[in-house]
């Protein structure tokens, strides 16, 4: 089976690339190892500019119809009283919203299928041989093995899972690693249009109303802080983290007071914030595997959707995807990626560093209390209003 492009992974990055390329008339295959719907460690917030991008990709109406309420205000929930400010308006569809990843990823994959992409699910990519005239991707499912060939291979498999592919990251444990946790709740009393940033010793998190009356609570905790809270609460990791949040953030404790857990806690990590290659070993990379921001700025889905689009735009400049045009597209895409995302990655890293230490978190709280509009400024700096370029 031969395609113009094989996309490995059907998260927002893979679906966006597949949707854009299929919409341009290219033959696309998507390989996804999990069965959908599946839940994912993610806060599930999407800024407004991404809804406009989803319109271009033909999935905007389905996403809007299912998403939670518009997020019009941001807040800081730390050790002191809550501070609130307005969410900056983006051009076009002014405010963002949240949609459970079990729903979002299924909707996007269905849209890619409708646009003509061939879907291999649940199939896992286990080997990529790229760099020649055509690339070969070996995929496996339930003891069966197949080889797909294509001009271009797009790695969209995220950055948290380990595996045998050249584009996957090595396992390295570091003291400063962060682990992610997420759960849905029902019956919380958080205002429907508010998205607070939670700051607590050793970590940070966020809450937002998603679809179907579910409140999404997600957070990250540094490895050493996680060990401390597990020791303190003598509980499994997620329960200890939840107890730590309630003990550290009074406004979060109040908002979650009467709430009931909906489903199980999920955990992931260590997460891998940072900038990586967008194109290497003749494999294009989109989403988390190209670069990842600290979830404190809730921009990972945005970067996934937008990087898939930017890559498709770079490839669309070439009729034939031979080695020369792939290298040229790789250069164009890498530049576009840096222009679009470098500032928010740096902003996320600085904010995360400030948030996790009690001294700097205290100073951050004092600044935000004196100047609540700094919250709106932070949201703008994190790219929430930055328009997605058109294909040229
Ligand atoms: C605690 C936390 C909170 C967050 N909150 C937010 C938020 O509110 N807003 C936001 O925008 N971002 C948030 N993020 C970030 C966001 O979740 C990620 O950036 C986003 O999921 C990246 O999308 P992706 O498509 O690159 O990868 P993923 O979503 O990880 O998708 C990768 C897909 O590839 C598949 N796959 C992997 N390996 C293979 C293989 N070998 N073969 C086939 N398939 C494979 C996986 O099954 C998966 O479906 C948060 C992250 C964390 C940790």
Image: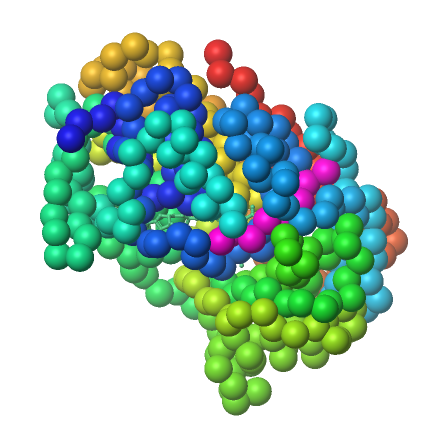
Compare residues 328 and 184 and report the one nearer the observer: 184
- Identity of the residue drawn at 42% across and 45% down: 11
User: Is 136 covered by the magenta stretch?
Assistant: no
Q: Position of residue 254 (x, y in %)?
A: 78, 72
- Looking at the image, which residue sits at the far right? 370
Residue 365, can we see it?
no
Is residue 72 positioned above or below 258 on the image? Answer: above
Q: On the picture, is 55 further left or further right than 152?
A: right
In this view, 161 is above or below 175: above
Does the segment drawn in magenta span residue 96? yes
- State the extent of the magenta-drawn residues as a range: 95-102
- Residue 381 lies left or right of residue 10; in this view the side is right
Q: Position of residue 194 (x, y in %)?
A: 77, 53
Q: Is residue 39 visible?
A: yes
Q: Nearer the viewer, residue 374 or 262?
A: 262
The residue under the point 32% across, 61% down is 172
Rendered location of residue 23, percent (x, y): 41, 21
**The quadrant where residue 368 appears:** bottom right
Residue 155 image position (x, y, % from top left): 31, 39
């Amino acid at each position: 089976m031969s395609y113009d492009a094989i996309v490995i992974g059907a998260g927002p990055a893979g679906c966006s690339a597949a949707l854009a390329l299929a919409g341009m008339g290219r033959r696309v295959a998507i390989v996804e190892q999990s069965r959908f719907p599946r839940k994912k460690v993610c806060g599930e917030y999407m800024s407004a500019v991404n809804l406009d991008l989803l319109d271009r990709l033909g999935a905007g109406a389905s996403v809007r119809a299912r998403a939670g309420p518009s997020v019009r205000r941001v807040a800081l929930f730390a050790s002191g009283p809550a501070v609130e400010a307005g969410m900056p308006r983006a051009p076009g569809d002014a405010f963002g919203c949240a949609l459970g990843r079990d729903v979002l990823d299924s909707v996007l994959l269905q849209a890619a299928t409708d646009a003509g992409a061939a879907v291999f699910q649940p199939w896992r990519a286990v080997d990529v041989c790229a760099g020649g005239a055509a690339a070969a991707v070996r995929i496996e499912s339930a003891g069966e093995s197949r080889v797909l060939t294509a001009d271009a291979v797009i790695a969209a498999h995220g950055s948290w899972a380990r595996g045998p592919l050249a584009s996957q990251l090595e396992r390295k444990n570091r003291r400063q690693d962060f682990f992610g946790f997420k759960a849905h709740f029902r019956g919380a009393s958080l205002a429907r249009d508010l998205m607070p940033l939670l700051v607590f010793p050793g970590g940070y998190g966020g809450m937002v109303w998603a679809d179907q009356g579910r409140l999404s609570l997600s957070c990250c905790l540094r490895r050493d802080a996680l060990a401390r809270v597990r020791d303190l609460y003598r509980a499994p990791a997620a329960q200890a983290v939840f107890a730590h949040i309630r003990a550290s953030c009074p406004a979060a404790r109040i908002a979650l007071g009467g709430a009931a857990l909906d489903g199980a806690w999920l955990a992931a990590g260590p997460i891998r914030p940072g900038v990586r290659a967008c194109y290497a070993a003749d494999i294009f990379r989109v989403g988390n595997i190209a670069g990842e921001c600290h979830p404190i700025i809730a921009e990972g889905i945005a970067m996934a959707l937008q990087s898939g689009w930017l890559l498709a735009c770079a490839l669309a400049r070439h009729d034939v995807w031979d080695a020369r045009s792939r290298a040229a597209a790789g250069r164009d895409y890498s530049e576009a990626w840096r222009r679009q995302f470098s500032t928010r990655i740096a902003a996320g890293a600085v904010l995360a560093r400030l948030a996790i230490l009690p001294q700097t978190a205290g100073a951050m709280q004092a600044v935000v209390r004196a100047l609540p509009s700094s919250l709106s400024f932070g949201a703008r700096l994190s790219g929430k209003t930055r328009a997605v370029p058109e294909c040229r």
